[in-house]
Amino acid sequence: MDEFDRLEQVSDVEWVLPPHDRMTVPGRIYADRETIEQLRREGSDEAQWSALRQVKHVASMPGIVSAALALPDVHPGYGFPIGGVGAFDLDAGVAVVGGVGFDINCGVRVLRTPLERARIADDIERIGEDLFRSVPAGLGSSGTLRLSVEEIDRVLDEGASYVVRQGYGLPEDLEFAEEGGRMSGADPAAVSALAKQREFKQVGTLGSGNHYLEVQYVERVLDVEAAAAYGLREGQVVVAIHTGSRALGHQIGQDYLKELGAASVRYGLAIPDQEMACAPIRSPEGARYLAAVAAGANCAFANRQMIAHLVRTSLERSCGLDPRDVGAVYDIGHNNAKIEEHDVDGERRRLLVHRKGATRAFGPGREEAPAAYRRVGHPIFVGGTMGTASYIMRGTERGMQLAFGSGIHGAGRALSRKKAAKKYWGDEIVAALRRDGIRVWAHDARGVAEEAPGAYKDVERVVAAAETAGLNRAVARLRPMAVIKG
Amino acid sequence: MGFAYRDHTADLAVRAWGATVGEAFAEAARALLGAMVNLDRVRPTELREFSLRAGSLELLLVDWLSALVAEKDTSGLVFSRFCAEVAQDEGEPSLRAAAWGEPLDPPRHEARSEVKGISLLGLRVRAEGTMWIAEYVADV
């Protein structure tokens, strides 16, 4: 029986895959019908490349709690689907490499500026050009920081706080970052020498692919109270930084795919696909993997911290802004596995929550959020495309119950890179966006074609589904003014 | 021997082939580097040698491709010519390979996407008639 034929529709935006075969919990997908139809079309091509099958795999892993979840931007990934969330019991559960992926703690930091869109519209060319020159991006770019092995270990242990202490940032940046910009439990010794070697020149580099730096403006405030708490108002210019743990994180992913693949065999864990390589959370191998993930996450926090510094320096040069007036709204990752407390069936439990292409989105009252945001829940950032809106949303109480406090992270691809590159020309995309008042700087024209707005799903639909399901609430809609691609 | 990029909503899906496993592995490498740079622009002036062993042909392919990805960050080299031999006689399959290239020069090499990792999804090495086929998906 086709997995899609088993899907039961609960509401316009909720679908359940009842437990069968090795599933111990249901799969629960929060998405609109169009997304489900697209998954069905994609899933028929290749068995392992089916987001629904991947949800089923997650629901079949030992120690999974409540349900394997997929959020509205769900699409196929490696192991877990993108937009996948899986929470595991600490005693019976496993740490899964495919629940985090290669780009550990890839995420977004948003900086708010005192600038008004109307005031800088004529200057955007100069502002964007300076940012493009200031923030290293693209294949083979290197950062200004050159770190020794000892310094890399400090970055892996201390994350953004190490970078701030070196003078690259404001102390309050750490308050406005998930985990304070530093994951506890990181162990640099769990990270291979090769991974560290690959990182020497990469702190403070953007990377390529879907990573970007965007100057945006707040087009519309949709939740007045939360926007006020986040320091956002209509017309205000913000800067979004989307990048991750760079080659170091990639190498951790590659190393542990192999290590936990072997551990799965040793522990007699029947894994549904090789990307679901795993080890019991309480085992030495599982603990080591999580310590490496925390280290990789710290590398990503440090990277975004360094880029935030470069952005401030650039804005000081191009707009005369005092770096202290460019505060962080928040910094949050979307590929991670973390131990968190959640209420499950009326009981408070500590769980290992994997979020793959999904952010943490804690609602009001959680102490993990910065004190200034605690009343409204912390912000999450939903990337659109270089031609469309992005959103700032927030966590909700309902989202805490439905999805372990998780949120959407982007629009999700609709076309393969190959199809997009065939359909679009980078130069034409850049020219078309320019007509819409959006300036693009890119190191690679083909990369622009692959990332063309038309290659992605409609972010509005994804946001609407998250809101309708009650997972997240929209706070502000942002529009791009200047886009810098790797 | 040769390679083709398959259409896949995953990032980079490759099918490479050759008369021997080694040839298929060399073509798989060409496809990988071809996604990172314009191969025609990379002069084969520097040589790197690789000697690897893994539990299966598939994992050997992953190790080989991962080693090439890592070289860009460690030695700074990207490659355009490859020669590989794979032995499967006893125990674990092993690879001896050479790659020729030069230090990455992004504008001249028309640098493109970084490769984050080689996935185990859709990973296959098999004989088909007289040809060896190597298939993989990379996350970019």
Image (tube, helix red, strand yellow):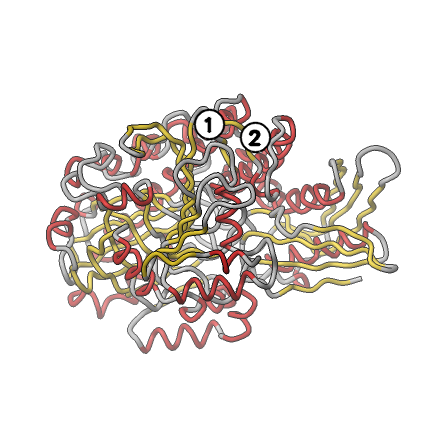
Mark 1 or 2, nearer chain start: 2
Amino acid residing under circle 1: Ala
Image height of B82 relative to B7, above or below: above
Q: Chain letter of disc 1?
A: A
Which residue lies under the disc numbered 2?
A: A192
Q: Which residue is denoted by mark 1 in the rendering?
A: A291
Q: Measuring 85% from the left and 40% from the top, which residue is drawn there? A: B88
Q: Is label 1 in a helix, a strand or a loop?
A: helix
Label 2 lies in what chain? Answer: A
Q: Is residue A67 above or below residue A423?
A: above
- Is residue A72 at all visible to an observer of this figure? yes
Query: Can residue A299 be seen from the camera position used here?
Result: no
- Check the image and report above or below for A214 versus A287: below
Q: Where is residue B3 shown, x and y percent of the image?
A: 72, 62
Q: Amino acid at mark 2?
A: Ser
Residue closest to the eye, A251 or B83: A251
**Residue A324 vs residue A288: left or right?**
left
**Number of marks:** 2
Q: For residue A182, which quarter of the picture?
A: top left
Spatial CA distance of label 1 from label 2 is 12 Å
Q: Residues within 10 Å of mark 1 (few under 14, many from 20)?
A: many
Classify mark 2: residues with Cα within 10 Å, few (<14), some (14-19) or many (20+): some
**Is A282 above or below relative to A450?**
above
Residue A160 marker:
none
Residue A291, percent across and down? 46, 27
Quarter of the image containing the C terminus of chain B? bottom right
As helix, strand or loop, the secondary structure at mark 2 comes to loop
At x 74% / y 48%, what residue is drawn? B99
Point out residue A76 in the picture as x, y percentages from the top left corner: 50, 55
Q: Residue at x 85, y 57 (%)?
A: B19
